[in-house]
Amino acid sequence: MLTLLLLCLPLPLPAAQPVADIHLHYKWSQQEVTSPQDAVRSMQEQNIVLGVVTGTPAGLALKLQQLAPGRVLPIWSPYRAGGDWQRWARDPGVVERARAALASGAYHGIGELHLIGGFMPKLDRSPVLQELMALAAEYDVPVMLHTEFSRPDYLLELCTRYPDTRILWAHSGAILPPDQVARVFTACDNVWGGLGARDPWRFVRNPIADADGTLLPAWRALLLRHADRFMVGSDPVWPVDQLDRWDRADTGWDELGRFWDFHRGWLARLPGAVALQIGCTNAVTLFRMQTRVHCADTASAR
């Protein structure tokens, strides 16, 4: 009877395909609702085998890395409190702190750096940005840039001026359509595109997919054309419009599953080899983690 009962029970579903999340935050405004243990548990539940984490302040990313050293990859951020996203480029102490952080070996990149119209000085008037771009090349680590302009000109100037710096383009231009993103990819082979927050709840005016989660034709063509240079990130910040409000906690980690359900949906409609590249192996390659992180679906193979 027990044997018959066991045979009638549903078998557990296979684990989701392993993925790399190149855009995770762990911030001062998230700690009170999401402990480091909670954050790592969420990554495990989503089968995120590589999570690139920016801490605000930077040391918070190390708390996650200490709990999951094989899964979490911290990158260094100049942001220490809410509002620094619009002040960092005018802080002369940023470069010295960045050099010390990279020299420690604890951080494997720089970012996320916000370059947004109205807050960002022109490149020739921003020695902090210039020195950070050079520092990333010196330490051979990527720098994650968030640009938000109506044209890609600022990033085009950066990527051509610093060809030895690997640039991870957060949100792949944020508000830019695919033809403008394509301009950057064609001009600069040192740029990789992240698709964090390119979902139905954040950059809603420039979606990459339609209402049922199917990639729009122009975006699909772009991803297929540059399948070795796109990556996925969740960017777990929520509510998105709060901009680090001091009186409201950021509950982004509670939304991690929802964000990844969306991305897994359109990834599943791409050719298998392309989905594996964009969903995992490109990030492993960019961050030089081939010997530490494996994207094969070992769980379903057992």
Image (spheres, helix red, strand yellow):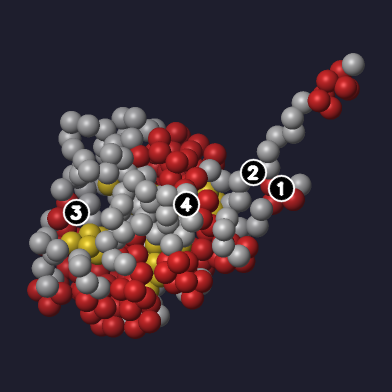
- Give me the C-alpha separation between circle 2 and circle 3: 37 Å
Q: Which residue is mark 4?
A: 213
Q: Which label is found at residue 300?
A: 1
Q: Secondary structure at mark 1?
A: helix
Q: Amino acid at mark 3?
A: Trp
Answer yes or no: do the residues labelled 4 and 1 have beta carbons within 8 Å? Answer: no
- Mark 2 / mark 4, whichever is N-terminal: 2
Answer yes or no: do the residues labelled 4 and 3 have beta carbons within 8 Å? Answer: no
Identified at 33% across, 79% down, the residue is: 183
- Give me the C-alpha separation between circle 4 and circle 3: 31 Å
- Structural crowding at the residue carrying mark 3, measured as other residues with C-alpha within 10 Å and reported as few (<14), some (14–19) or many (≥20): many
**Which of pointers 2 and 4 indicates the residue nearer the eye?**
4
Q: Which residue is mark 3?
A: 85
- Mark 3 / mark 1, whichever is N-terminal: 3
Answer yes or no: do the residues labelled 2 and 1 have beta carbons within 8 Å? Answer: yes
- Mark 2 / mark 1, whichever is N-terminal: 2
